[in-house]
Amino acid sequence: MSRAFVREPDGDEVQDDLPPKPQSEHPNYVTPGGLTALQAMRDRLQTEKAALEAHKDDMESKQALPHVQRDLRWVLERIERAILIDLSSQPSERVGFGAEVEVIDEDDKRRSYRIVGEDEADAANGLVSWVSPLARALNGATVGDVVIWKRPAGDMELEIAAIRFPDK
């Protein structure tokens, strides 16, 4: 077919067929705080969607609405797929999902990490996804164990100094 017969959107039209945001291939394990954050995101997006729909004659609202709808579909699926982990059932002497782990690295620097769901991860604040190489290295360790964190910058030994489950 010739491109002459394909209708291109003009400046006044809004493209509302955005591709879906990808979902992780991993189970969606969440801490209680992680589930609360997803629910808050859902509520915020529903409010934003309603406000945009109320002003659907406004071009900015028309353009923003498909993005909000796509984000809302994504968060609704994340909530539907959420597997809430009961942190009180985790063995407190072993590193597991939801644990806050204090480690000592090869330079005797102490750092704390908390193993959380993928949506909660924030490495800058010590929140690491349960599927990350660091969390996988720490998982199952006990106080006094030395684990090897396989990093792109090179392997690093970490000694487990403390394990806490803050939401217990």
Image (spheres, grey):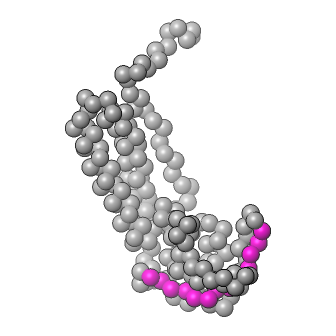
Quadrant in which residue 103 is drawn: bottom right
Q: How many marks?
A: 0
Residue at horizontal 37 percent and vertical 23 percent from the top? 13
Q: Where does the magenta region start and end? A: 154-166
50 drawn magenta:
no
Residue at horizontal 38 percent and vertical 27 percent from the top? 14
Dominant secondary structure of the residues highlighted in magenta in the image:
strand
Q: Is residue 22 above or below residue 146?
A: above
Question: Can I make out residue 152 in this image?
Answer: yes
Left or right: 55 in relation to 150: left
Residue 134 percent location from the top left of the image: 64, 71
Left or right: 38 in relation to 24: left
162 drawn magenta:
yes
Q: Is residue 48 above or below residue 121?
A: above
Q: Is residue 43 above or below residue 127?
A: above
Residue 77 percent location from the top left of the image: 41, 53
Residue 70 percent location from the top left of the image: 41, 43
Is 41 in front, or is 90?
A: 41
Question: Can I make out residue 95 in this image?
Answer: no
Residue extending farthest right: 154
Q: The C terminus is located in which quarter?
A: bottom left
Residue at horizontal 48 percent and vertical 65 percent from the top? 120
Residue at horizontal 41 percent and vertical 29 percent from the top? 15
Left or right: 111 in relation to 45: right
Residue 133 percent location from the top left of the image: 66, 68
